[in-house]
Image (tube, grey):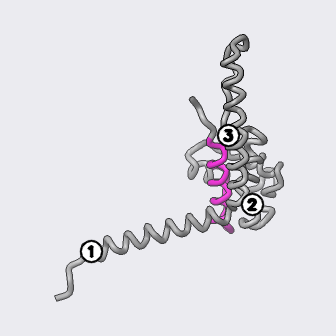
Amino acid sequence: MKYSTKLSDTLHLLAFLCLARGERLTSARIAESVKTNPAYIRQLMSALKKAGLISSDQGQVNAALTRSADQITMLDVYRAVEGEKPLLHLDIHTNPECGIGVNVQLSIGDFYREIQDTVEEKMQKITLQDILDRYEQRIQERGMAGDERQQNTTEPDV
């Protein structure tokens, strides 16, 4: 079963824009980081621009956020690239003649809607700035781990 990575790829793209601010960015450079092709990055950027989350001039490499990172939520980004597409999907190919199949799917659908509401509520609370902060935290932790490893491998002073 194939699943969409549009949300994580788009959040990656937005984080890249923030972290490489002031640098000349091309869709090819961002695509290299996401490990995809430049056309896909341009497609995601187009969706972000249409949603009003970034601004850019056609043919120019100067995309910028239209709001600060703490004002862009994960839900904003999800809706920009996935629209109103739900996270979970019912099997719509069950036998319509079977009362069990139909009612089980409808029952599952009730729970899927509850899950969707809960996830969207959480996504509304997570901002691009939260992701950038977590990124910085991970970089610092990895840096400290590297420093500790280096200290443990050096000869003690005699």
> Is disc 3 placed on a helix, strand or loop?
loop
Vertically, is 39 above or below 1? below
Magenta segment's dominant SS is helix
Residue to which mark 3 is pinned: 87
The residue drawn where x is 72% and y is 39% is 113
Q: Residue furthest top?
A: 97
Q: Relative to the observer, which residue lies in front, 36 or 52?
A: 52
Residue to which mark 2 is pinned: 72
- Asked if the residues shown at circle 2 and circle 3 are in contact, with their CB atoms under 8 angstroms apart, the answer is no
Extent of the magenta region: 5-28
- Asked if the residues shown at circle 3 and circle 1 are in contact, with their CB atoms under 8 angstroms apart, the answer is no
Tell which tag, 2 or 3, sits nearer the viewer: 3
The answer for how far apart the CA atoms under marks 2 and 3 are is: 20 Å
Label 3: few (<14), some or many (≥20) within 10 Å?
some
The answer for how far apart the CA atoms under marks 3 and 1 are is: 46 Å
Q: Relative to the observer, which residue lies in front, 90 or 68?
A: 90
Q: Relative to the observer, which residue lies in front, 121 or 57?
A: 121
1 or 2: tag closer to the N-terminus: 2
The answer for how far apart the CA atoms under marks 1 and 2 are is: 42 Å
Which of the numbered marks, if any, corresponds to residue 152?
1
> Is disc 2 placed on a helix, strand or loop?
loop
Vertically, is 137 above or below 7? below
- If the image is split into quadrants, where does the N terminus sit? top right
Q: Report the amino acid beneath label 3.
A: Leu
Q: Report the amino acid beneath label 1.
A: Asn
Label 2: few (<14), some or many (≥20) within 10 Å?
many
> Is disc 1 placed on a helix, strand or loop?
helix
Q: Is residue 18 magenta?
A: yes
2 or 3: tag closer to the N-terminus: 2
3 or 1: tag closer to the N-terminus: 3
- Residue 30: x percent and y percent? 62, 53
- Residue 121: x percent and y percent? 72, 54
